Image (tube, helix red, strand yellow):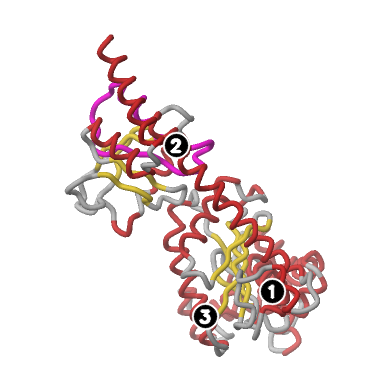
C-alpha cells in the first residue's frame, strides 16, 4: 500500500514538473508512456491523433485517425473513469486499449493507452491524472485561440449580415483577416436531423471539428450558426460553374468519407451558393446556400450537395415557403399515396422511377425489374387514381415538381 501511494505521488510530481516546465502535450504523454511501458496517444473529438508517444513504433492507423470505436467508448466514459476495448488495426489484429475523456464531456478529445492488459486501479488513475493535465494545457491553448476565433466569427457575421457600407469599411473593421477581393462563395453544412427534428449537440460539435479539420487551408473560414456550419470559400480566380462545383464536390465528398464513422451513423447535407467576384456579395451566396440546403433536404437524397444554381424553378418557388410547397405536393400526390396505402401497391414509387428515368419506358422497366406491359398497366392505373393524363406537358410539370418536393425523390 505504501509503495502504491509513493508511486502515485512520484507520478503526480512528474506531471506537475512537466506543466511548470511548459513541456506541452508530448512531455505529459511521455511521462505516462514511460510509467506504463505502453504506447500512449491523444486524439481530438474528431478522432484525429494530436500527439503520440510510442518510440520505435509507427501510428497503428492510417492517416492519423483513431478507429471510431475508441471515440465512441471515450465519449460514453464519465470524467475520471476509463473504458476498455479492442480496436481494429491495419494488420487485422485487434489492439487492446484503455481510454478516458479529456475535459468536460470530452471537449478536448480522448487519451488512450494501447496494448494495455492489466487492471491496476492505481495505473488507471495515472491515465485519468494525465488526462486532467492535458486538459490544463489544451484549455490554455484554447484561451489563446478563442480570441482569434471570436475575431474570425465576427468577420463571418459581418459578411453574412452585410453590416457594412462597402469593402473599405469592412477592411477597417477586420484588418488583414481576409482577402476581400477574391472570388468567394458560401457553403452551409448540417447533420441529419433524423426523427428527433434536432441535431444532438455531440454530433453537431463532432461535425464542426471535422469540418475545421478537413478544410483545405486558410482560404476556407468556418463558423457555427445554430445547428449549421457555414464555410466561406475564397478562390485565387473566378472559376467556371463546372470547375466550382467540382472543387466543392471533391472537398465535401472527402469530408463525408472521413465524417461518417464519427457522427453516430448520421449523414450530413450541404448547400452551396453561387460564386461571386468578391466579399461584397458573400451574404447573397449565404442565403442561396441556405435555400439549397433546405430544398436539398426536402427533395433530394440525404447527405448530398445541392447547388443553388442547379435548383432551376425551385429557387423561385422557394420564396413561397416550404409549407405551401409541401401542401402543393400533398394535393398532387395525396390520392396516389392513399391508394398505395389502402391497396398495398407501389404506384407512387413507379411514377417516381418513371420520371427519374426521363419517362423512358425501357429504362424504367429495367430499373423496376418488370415487363413493359406491367409498367404500362401501373402508369395507367396511376393516371386513373390521379385523374390526369401523363401525356400532357402541364401534368408532367406538376408531377415532376411534386415528386421533386417529396423527400427521397
284 is within the stretch colored magenta: no
Position above or below: 243 against 5? below
Against 8, residue 228 (above or below) is below
Query: Helix or strand or loop: what does disc 3 sit on?
Result: helix
The one nearer the camera, 252 or 294, is 252
The magenta segment is 100-127
| Label of residue 171 in the image | 1
Q: Quadrant of the C terminus?
A: bottom right
Q: How crowded is the residue under tag 3: few (<14 C-alpha within 10 Å), some, or many (20+)? A: many
Q: Nearer the viewer, mark 1 or mark 3?
A: 1
Secondary structure of the residue carrying numbered label 2: strand
The residue under the point 41% across, 41% down is 110
For marks 1 and 3, the one nearer the N-term is 1
Q: Which residue is mark 2?
A: 101
Judged left or right of residue 125, residue 119 is left
Of pointers 2 and 3, the one earlier in the residue sequence: 2
Q: Which residue is mark 3?
A: 364
Amino acid at each position: 500500500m505504501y509503495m502504491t501511494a509513493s508511486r502515485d505521488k512520484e507520478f503526480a510530481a512528474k506531471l506537475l514538473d512537466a506543466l511548470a516546465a511548459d513541456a506541452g502535450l508530448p512531455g505529459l504523454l511521455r511521462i505516462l508512456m514511460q510509467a506504463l511501458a505502453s504506447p500512449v496517444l491523444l486524439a481530438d473529438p474528431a478522432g484525429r491523433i494530436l500527439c503520440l508517444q510510442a518510440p520505435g513504433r509507427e501510428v497503428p492507423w492510417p492517416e492519423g485517425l483513431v478507429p471510431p470505436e475508441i471515440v465512441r467508448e471515450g465519449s460514453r466514459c464519465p470524467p475520471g473513469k476509463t473504458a476498455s476495448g479492442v480496436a481494429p488495426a491495419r494488420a487485422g489484429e485487434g489492439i487492446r486499449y484503455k481510454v478516458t475523456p479529456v475535459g468536460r464531456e470530452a471537449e478536448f478529445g480522448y487519451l488512450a493507452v494501447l496494448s494495455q492488459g492489466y487492471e491496476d486501479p492505481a495505473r488507471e488513475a495515472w491515465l485519468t491524472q494525465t488526462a486532467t493535465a492535458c486538459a490544463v494545457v489544451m484549455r490554455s491553448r484554447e484561451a489563446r485561440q478563442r480570441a482569434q476565433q471570436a475575431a474570425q466569427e465576427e468577420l463571418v457575421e459581418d459578411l453574412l449580415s452585410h453590416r457594412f457600407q462597402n469593402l473599405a469599411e469592412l477592411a477597417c473593421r477586420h484588418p488583414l483577416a481576409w482577402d476581400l477581393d477574391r472570388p468567394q462563395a458560401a457553403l452551409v453544412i448540417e447533420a441529419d436531423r433524423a426523427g428527433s427534428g434536432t441535431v444532438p449537440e455531440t454530433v453537431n460539435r463532432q461535425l464542426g471539428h471535422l469540418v475545421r479539420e478537413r478544410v483545405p487551408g486558410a482560404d476556407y473560414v468556418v463558423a457555427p450558426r445554430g445547428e449549421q456550419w457555414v464555410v466561406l470559400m475564397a478562390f485565387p480566380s473566378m472559376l467556371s460553374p463546372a470547375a466550382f462545383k467540382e472543387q466543392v464536390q471533391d472537398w465535401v465528398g472527402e469530408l463525408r468519407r472521413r465524417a461518417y464513422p464519427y457522427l453516430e451513423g448520421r449523414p450530413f447535407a450541404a448547400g452551396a451558393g453561387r460564386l461571386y467576384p468578391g466579399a461584397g456579395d458573400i451574404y447573397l451566396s449565404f442565403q442561396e446556400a441556405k435555400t439549397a440546403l433546405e430544398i436539398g433536404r426536402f427533395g433530394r437524397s440525404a447527405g448530398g450537395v445541392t447547388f443553388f444554381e442547379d435548383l432551376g424553378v425551385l429557387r423561385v418557388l422557394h420564396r413561397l415557403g416550404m409549407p405551401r410547397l409541401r401542401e402543393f405536393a400533398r394535393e398532387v400526390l395525396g390520392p396516389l399515396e392513399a391508394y398505395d396505402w389502402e391497396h398495398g401497391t407501389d404506384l407512387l414509387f413507379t411514377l417516381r422511377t418513371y420520371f427519374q428515368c426521363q419517362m423512358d419506358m425501357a429504362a424504367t422497366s429495367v430499373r423496376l425489374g418488370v415487363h413493359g406491359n406491367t409498367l404500362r398497366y401501373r402508369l395507367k392505373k396511376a393516371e386513373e387514381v390521379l385523374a390526369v393524363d401523363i401525356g400532357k406537358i402541364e401534368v408532367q410539370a406538376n408531377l415532376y415538381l411534386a415528386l421533386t418536393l417529396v423527400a427521397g425523390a
